[in-house]
Amino acid sequence: MAPRARGNLCVTNAMQEFLITNFYEKIMAPRARGNLCVTNAMQEFLITNFHIKRELISPLYDKPPEFFHPTSAVNMHELMMRLQEEFVLQCPELMREMCETTGKDVDERTNACTSTLFTKVEMIDGVKTVCARIDRPALVISSTSWTPDEDFSILLEALEMFDAAIQNGAESGGRKCWGNSHVVVVVTGKGPQKEMYEEKIKQMTLKYVTVMTLWLEASDYPLLLGCADLGVSLHTSTSGLDLPMKILDMFGCEVPVCAIGFDCLGELVQDGVNGCIFDTSDELARQMFQLLNVDRTRDDHRIQGELSRYRNNIKGMIRWRENWKVQAHKIVMSACPSTANFRNDKASDKKIN
């Protein structure tokens, strides 16, 4: 069989599978006693296209697990010490400046540096105490699968404009126009386009911004996310009906996000409340400059200003376990009347006894 014919056959088979699956779902969905979906947009889609009764379907939003939370200064220091070699490799100039300003921060026994770009060890009342550095860079995190589904060039273009805006401000009005010494953008994940974009990153000439790519241990990813001042999401939903888990992970760590807009994103990211929504690299650059341009007036773990307000709006987010009980319990129990009756019988027995 010719290659073109084989390709047509694959497409035909895939289309047949889609039609059969779609037909099966449309027949069975209205017959279910209960249905769960991940957004209000999906709920409306299923009601309209699959003829499910509204009272038999309920949105069950994804929520972050408990291990996504803000990282303490001690855990942040330990993580940054583990990543020190990567910072030396990918941020040599920043690390050199740090060594010049903290040359005395050396362990007398091992002769190893006890400071990182973000943390230091100080003697406070005779006790060694880990604290965040006032001169530390702002930390921005973006997680990507390095696939065509996420246009990573939007972030790179934004960073070039962002860096130019910082330079223009610094040259025209001095350091008062820019509150931070530097911005470190860490991009996590792996995928087919990673090497291509790493080459583009190497060719960028940035003065105030450093871009790093990391592949982290599963246990280190929540810790790094919990250290961030700001997150960036380039995920767009193909269907326009679901929401990015990476943003939920950021919110679990109380990290505000700048996210590229798509149809149902407003169900998760409220523009100007818990983050910002952008459509172009220019918009993203302006948002980053506005949010990160805050003076370090005290030894805070994270940047204050507008980001502090966003973080306060994120705090207290319900987690997955509680969310399941609140949102899913009723519809699951109504779909399983025998289970509900069994529980009611047990409750009655307890009262009688």
Image: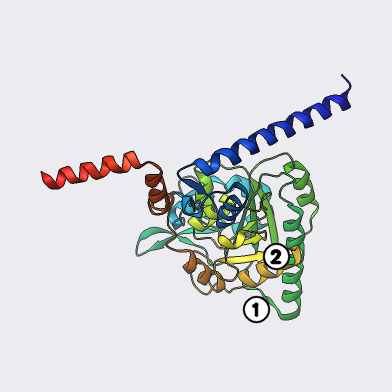
Residues under labels 1 and 2: Cα distance? 22 Å
Mark closer to the observer (1, 2): 2
Q: Which residue is mark 1?
A: 176
Callout 2: few (<14), some (14-19), or many (20+) C-alpha neighbours within 10 Å?
A: many
Image point (60%, 47%), residue name: 50
Looking at the image, which is closer to me, 105 or 117?
117
Q: Which residue is mark 2?
A: 284
- Looking at this view, name the residue that lies furthest to the top: 1
Q: Is residue 331 left or right of residue 27?
A: left
Point out residue 313 in the picture as x, y percentages from the top left corner: 48, 68
Marker disc for residue 204: none
Residue 178 falls in which quadrant of the image?
A: bottom right
The residue under label 2 is which amino acid type?
Leu
| Secondary element at tag 1 | helix
- Image quadrant occupied by the C terminus: top left
- Can you see residue 137? no
Point out residue 10 in the picture as x, y percentages from the top left corner: 78, 28
Image point (72%, 31%), residue name: 16
The residue under label 1 is which amino acid type?
Lys
- Can you see residue 32? yes
Image point (63%, 49%), residue name: 49
Q: Earlier in the sequence, mark 1 or mark 2?
A: 1
| Secondary element at tag 2 | helix
- Looking at this view, name the residue that lies furthest to the left: 353
Looking at the image, which is closer to me, 113 or 281?
281
